[in-house]
Amino acid sequence: MSEWDGKSKGTVLGYKIFVFLIRKAGVRAAYGLLFFVASYYFLFLTDSNRSIYYYFRKRLNYPPVKARLSVFRSYFTFGQTIIDKIAISAGLRNRFTYEFDGVETLKRLLAEKKGAVLISAHMGNFEIAEHFFAEIDLDFHINLVTIDQEHSAIKEYLESIGKPSVKLILIRDDMSHIFKINEALSNNELVCFTGDRYLKGNKYMSSPLLGKEARFPAGPFMIASRLRVPVVYVYVMKEAGLHYHLYAREATVKHRDAQALLTSYTESVEGMIGRYPLQWFNYFDFWAIDS
């Protein structure tokens, strides 16, 4: 079974083709080309197909035919979120519409000037959050805590299109990232983690998700439960057409109880999966806790 290695698939050439099409013919034309890309993934990516089929068939209990069709629809939806991210970064933000659910929570927390920890997941399109927040004139800095294993050539190309305002805090063996996290929070900034991808060899915690035990990275939950700052679950989910929906929910955090925070998080993720089953973008053996 496949394991997540910290990297996503794709090539610079592929991104350039989609950027050209978006600029010349629009987002929906890029969606048309995406049909063929998603078909290729569906036909030839055996390991990720097996893993995401398991998610639909065994964890969501879809019938076999629906589960197989959902594999293709998942790839297609994932591709749409990437195209949308590129389009928005390239200056086409006004082509999209935005809906807010819980943004008053973020406004209130920022007014308290303590900073806040956001925990999201590889669902929907959280990477457009900075553009999303700009729509409501919410002025603050987002710091994304990351392992930074992505292909540097793709990152450099995307930054050449539209430089992100999100600041990266890289996880280091010397624990220097902890000081940067505390500094950001002291400046009333937001620190964001994704809580759903455990990288083999790193410290982890386990909790049931969709009825079966799974591993999660320990860092986000251990750090967030110790900081004495608000914790908010945030998701930016794609709706029909060019419409996005932001969800923000404040978590109840007991100091130094990372397991309780993880349990709260998995319940939050399950709620989002229930609404948006096609937007769970973890194409590896997520529940392989015995490996």
Image (cartoon, rainbow, N blue to C red):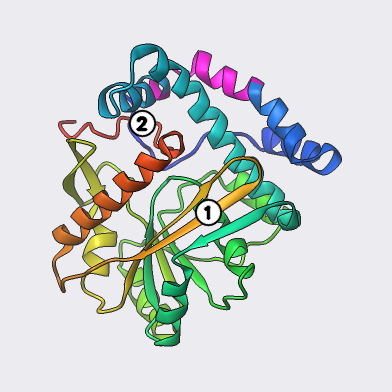
Vertical arrangement, residue 276 with respect to residue 33, above or below: below
Instruction: Say which residue label 1 marks.
Output: 245
Magenta segment: does it hold 177? no
In this rendering, position of residue 158 left or right of residue 267: right
- Say left or right for 261 vs 52: left
Answer with left or right where residue 195 lies relative to residue 41: left
Residue 38 to residue 217: above or below:
above
The amino acid type of the residue labelled 2 equals Phe
Please name the amino acid that badge 1 sits on. His
Nearer the observer: mark 2 or 1; the answer is: 1
The residue positioned 57% from the left and 76% from the top of the image is 138
Residue placed most toward the observer, 135 or 190: 135
Which SS class for mark 2? loop
Q: Which residues are magenta?
A: 36-48
Q: CA distance from mark 2 to mark 1?
A: 26 Å
Residue 284 got which mark? 2
- Which image quadrant for residue 252? bottom left
